[in-house]
Image (cartoon, helix red, strand yellow):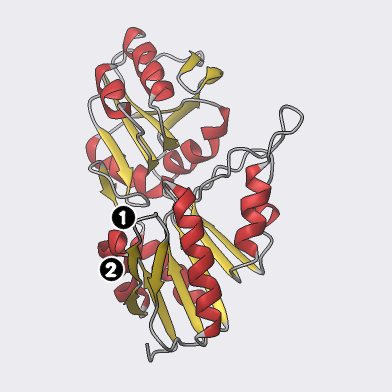
Amino acid sequence: MTSAAGLLYFEDETQFALQLAHDAGLTPALIQRHRFPDGELKLRLPSALPSHVVVLRSLVNPNEKLVELLLVARTARSLGAQRLTLVAPYLAYMRQDIAFHPGEVVSQRVVGQFLASLFDAVITVDPHLHRIHSLDEAIPVATTVVLSGAPLLGDLIAKHHAHPFLIGPDGESAQWVAAAAQSHGFDCAVCKKIRHGDHAVDILLPSIDVKGRAVVVLDDVASSGQTLARAAQLLLAAGAESVDVAVTHALFAGDALTVISNAGVSRIWSTDCIRHESNAVSLCSTIAQCLIKLN
């Protein structure tokens, strides 16, 4: 690497990384990765690094990737990097922000402090922050930037529906629904969710009339799909003409896509913060503009 700033990435994120590097004017370099028979990892970085290094790692399936970040960040410092920026389009372990029972690990705090020990800046998209107001409360670094995929999803929805109704599946989704609806003047509302477990939820629709309307259920993340599926079923039963789903982070664990489709959802859209067949809009340009300002 010879430029003022470089981008380190892993092979499974090559397409996103190369586009990001191009848009942000960074020199990209692949982190070589080998797995030993016992599961340990061997990583190899360029032998010399510029003063500012950006590390790209979207933290879906995060456990092993957190080890990767530890190895990469510590080594990058020894190879010349004086400033390290983590670009994590999806940021894991943000949901558990309080101990509901004695002895529970507050993973948001633990993982946040871990990342803060490695990086000087963190850029992410629509992190799941519930009981805190800003990302630096979870990750105490000098610079934190929170971007959103909701406006881009709103633009996409506008291309498919003239007057859609945007619905959030729970109160936590209100911020993203409002952001997606704002620039186009869409009608919007949120449901109330009562969770009984990872795969059991009750949904209460808001007091609205969706008869004959094209409805889009919008949220930050889709994991099991149960919440989105239940909301879609209720909306169709209430007379909605169609129900689509739009999410920033396409986790879609297990049979989530099937669960959502079987509930009567017509189309499923997501951003490319997590690579998935449902990706319909890209955050590359948005993240690149942020990096240009920081550099």
Q: Which mark is residue 162?
A: none
Q: Secondary structure at mark 2?
A: helix
Q: Secondary structure at mark 1?
A: loop
The residue nearer to you, when weighing 123 against 70, is: 70
The residue nearer to you, when weighing 109 against 287, is: 109
Q: Which mark is residue 19?
A: 2
Residue on which the image places disc 1: 282
Q: Is residue 252 above or below residue 93?
A: above
| 279 horizontally vs 250: left or right | left
Q: Dot 1: few (<14), some (14–19), or many (≥20) neighbours within 10 Å?
A: some
In this view, the residue farthest toward the right is 102
In this view, the residue farthest toward the front is 38
- From the image, state whether disc 2 or disc 1 is nearer to you: 2
Q: Answer whether labels 2 and 1 touch (C-beta < 8 Å).
A: yes
Identify the amino acid type marked 1.
Answer: Ser
| 200 horizontally vs 247: left or right | right
Please state the horizontal and vertical placement of residue 110, each as a whole percent of the image.
Answer: 66, 50
Identify the amino acid type marked 2.
Answer: Gln
The residue nearer to you, when weighing 290 against 184, is: 290
Figure quadrant of the N terminus: bottom left
Determine the image quadrant of residue 289: bottom left
Which badge, 2 or 1, comes first in the chain's sequence? Answer: 2
Which residue sits at x=48%, y=43%? 179
Please state the horizontal and vertical placement of residue 196, each as a whole percent of the image.
Answer: 55, 15
The residue nearer to you, when weighing 248 against 252, is: 252
